[in-house]
Image (cartoon, rainbow, N blue to C red):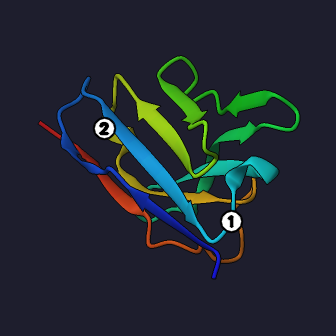
Amino acid sequence: QMQLVESGGGLVQPGGSLRLSCVASGFNLDAYAVGWFHKAPGKEPEGISCINVIKDDIWYDASVEGRFTTSRDKNGATVYLQMNSLKVEDAGAYYCALKCFSPPAEFWGQGTQVSVST
């Protein structure tokens, strides 16, 4: 069974850092483009990053470029989202998906919650 599981969220102060993980089971991520999505409270999910190994390309939304870094491990099992200089508006749920830019109809995982507060 193909699964994606997000983890790594937590509570940080503004300016802090977190590293999120998206772990695949049942398949290898190297064959896919993987997107990260942010769902702020009361809003629809928005794509914030996409890593495409086949095209050797990584995209970031302007809201996170320069602060967030997406990478993947050599085994193709995990994609990471390193989040630095976190802002209050970065709070919310984060999901990964085998899709970029626009969110899928349904996320496979439960997401991981990020809170940014003093």
The kind of residue on which mark 1 rests is: Phe
Mark 2, secondary structure of its residue: helix
- Residue at the bottom extreme of this rendering: 1
Q: Position of residue 57 (x, y in %)?
A: 79, 28
Picture quadrant where residue 82 is located: top left
Name the quadrant of the C terminus: top left
Q: Give the mark nearer the N terminus: 1 vs 2.
A: 1
On screen, 69 above or below 118?
Answer: above
The reply to whether residue 101 is in sight is: no
On screen, 18 above or below 1?
Answer: above
Q: Which residue is mark 1?
A: 27
**2 sits left or right of 63 in the view:** right
Residue 17 numbered tag: none
- Residue at the right extreme of this rendering: 55
Q: Position of residue 65 (x, y in %)?
A: 58, 23
Determine crowd level at label 2: few under 14, some 14-19, many 20+ residues with C-alpha closer than 10 A: some
Determine crowd level at label 1: few under 14, some 14-19, many 20+ residues with C-alpha closer than 10 A: some
On screen, 87 above or below 25?
Answer: above
Picture quadrant where residue 73 is located: top right
Foreground residue among 78 and 105: 78
**Marks 1 and 2, Cα distance to the nearest angstrom?**
35 Å
Q: Residue at x 72, y 30 (%)?
A: 58
The kind of residue on which mark 2 rests is: Val
Q: Position of residue 80 (x, y in %)?
A: 50, 40
**48 sits left or right of 80 in the view:** right
Q: Which residue is mark 2?
A: 88
**58 sits left or right of 40 in the view:** right
The reply to whether residue 42 is in sight is: yes
Q: Residue at x 71, y 38 (%)?
A: 51
Name the quadrant of the N terminus: bottom right
